[in-house]
Amino acid sequence: MIETKKPKLELLSPALVEQIVDEGLTVLERHGVMVENAEALGLLAGAGADVDLGSERVRIGRKLVQDCLATTPASVTLYDREGSRAFAVGGDEVHFDPGSSAVALLDHGTQAERKATTADVVDMYKLVETLEHIHFQSTALIASDVPGAVADAFRLYLGLLLSEKPFVTGTFRVEGFGPMKDLLAAVRGGEGALRAKPLAIFDACPSPPLKWSNLTTQSLIDAARAGIPSELISMGMTGATSPTTIAGTLVQHVAENLSGLVICQLAGRGTPVIFGGSPSSFDMRKGTTPMGAMETMMIDAAYAQIGKFLKLPTNAYMALSDAKVNDPQAGFETALGAVLGALAGVNVISGPGMLDYESSLSLEKLAIDDGICAMVYRLLDGIAQRDDPIALGAFEGFVPGMSFLTHPHTRQWYRKEHIGAGLADRDPYQAWVAAGRTSIVDKAHADVGRRLGEYAAPPLDEAVRKELDRIMADYGRISGSGDLPLPVL
Amino acid sequence: MTKNEIFPKMTEAIVAGDRKTAGALAEEAVRSGFDLSEVVEKGYVPGIQKVGELWEQGEYFLPELISSAEAMKAAMAVLEPELNRQGVGARMGGKIVIGTVEGDIHDIGKNLVASMLQAGGFEVFDLGADVKLEKFIETAEAVGAGMICLSALLTTTMVNQRRFIALLRDKGLRDKYRVLVGGAPASGKWAEEIGADGYAENAVAAVKLAKSLAGHS
């Protein structure tokens, strides 16, 4: 059998990749980065970087960057809550998770955005738990009824109660890391076990251009010490907070992400780091940051190629849309991003469910996007040679007008070669009319209802549950947040 | 250069967003002893008006708009001290306090509006982002502003625009100030609903609105 070709997209020529990386390193050497965190400045100075404590500016030589790249693993394996199912993040593996941290929920009934509440967050986790093509959960919604001081840990706590899947998450406050790590370690039965089987990725976003804030730097350091993978989310906005050319923004992307990687490695050698991002093609008319622009997706696909060149796992905020409702724009932007990201081999594609510049989440969109992800996985499987010869056997006994419908070859292969329609409409016109001209959004709404109805919480050890409750209650008390809106689960 | 020679060059420098030339021409005007009010009015203001038109026609985008506003700023930095020395107010538009409301750190749009208001002849007091509502009032009272502009990018912080109007009412100051609101989630309907004096969709529209509310255009 001839080996199946894995479809693959590479937008940059090898020479351009090398020059972008080289210029990124030169930027770090010549201009440096601002690091607003004393501990990180100490680590960097100790490693021989040129640190100006007054201005918090650090110039990092390429030798140090290369040393740190050498100790960063090319892939990391996440495990589900039970610790049994493994998800390799590296190579050309592709996993989808919902985009991050929307503040609003698109209400299906009113078709308007409204503030999200804990009940919505619960529904989101339950729904994602049932969506088979979305491999990871994301703490993708911020509940307005939760005190800000505990919001980061509380949304992870809820997720861990409701779902088996690994998480993509992050801190809102420096103090949030401790309890979040404790929650994860409690699930695993200790910090050593968590280090051996990571359950969550922590996102950390530099502030473009070329700055790491105190909060995100501390997250990098804390995660590295706990062996928790950090996802570096450089997010230049072309022509506003990064150079306007795509290649120019990639230079900054390399500089920002690699400076983050150095901080991670200095805090914990060998800690996993994911080369991610959420850049955008800045809209020069509206001043907005479109995630669904083709140029945004091109930047994403290109830095993923660079991440692979650097032998790092990759992430991108793709498969999402700037549309405000589930309209054609929502569909085409999401699908384009999902396809391009997957073909570029982005390991963690964060986006499904997201609308309105990552600020609004739709449960219906999550269900629709799961179908897009299914199509993408089919694409990635490629075109295989199933038989040898390929089809001569199927033509044996050929007679004019013969049908393949009842041919054994069909029965043998059709389920492997073709996936179902999912929520997409494939009715003949009259049947579609007779069925009430239902749109995919209405079908998705019904699907969400069905899935939430059928959801059954994956069993969680009682002692673990109690420990999670205790950690959350302690954090609520320490931060003075009083009673938390604990849902009945 | 005579006035008739230099005015079109000033206009051109603003339209081109050329800070260096805009500033140099202003210095030349000062050296030549020209009537500086006339220089502003006939040399520079037509430039920024043209920029506004080009924006509205979809010809100019943010990079051009901001460059032109900065060129205007460079010219005014030269002219303003001279005008003040002569006892002539350079900022005929009046005083405006602007900022992004508390809880919201987004300031790209607000900065743009501030720059264009300044270029449009207003004296602008930019309080930055995440500004406490009381601070807007304190500043407006202290500097004698007539208008207050509130920006918000998030639906969650937009409510502070409503709270601000209530705060002004509580202090018995509502009629003293014109309040304009802006930002991605705001709208004309929203402005009406919360009892603000107006809403502008972008920086160019904001200048027009401010001018019409200030009683001159």
Image (spheres, coloured by chain):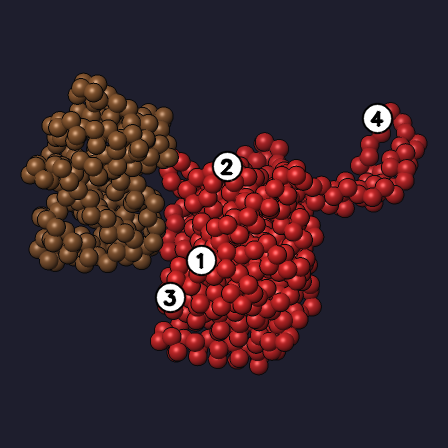
Chain colours: A red, B brown
- Secondary structure beneath disc 2? loop
- For residue A148, the mark is 3
- Point out the frontmost of discs 2 and 1: 1
Label 1 element class:
strand
Instruction: Give the spatial CA distance, label 3 vs label 2.
Output: 38 Å
Q: CA distance from mark 2 to mark 4?
A: 57 Å
Please name the amino acid that badge 3 sits on. Gly
Same chain for mark 3 and mark 1? The answer is yes
Image: B199 above or below A116: above
**Residue A96 percent coordinates (x, y):** 60, 52
Work out whether residue B187 or residue A450 is closer to the camera in this orientation and state it: B187
Q: Callout 2: 10 Å neighbours few (<14), some, many (20+)?
A: some
Q: Nearer the viewer, residue A381 or A230?
A: A230
When asked about the image quadrant of residue A411, the answer is top right
Residue where numbered disc 2 is placed: A245
Q: Residues within 10 Å of mark 1 (few under 14, many from 20)?
A: some
Mark positioned earlier in the residue sequence (2 or 4): 2
Q: Residue at x 26, y 33 (%)?
A: B23
- Return the x and y of residue A103 as percentages of the image width and height: 41, 55
**Label 1 belongs to which residue?**
A57
Name the subunit of mark 2: A
- Where residue A124 sits: x, y (%)? 50, 58
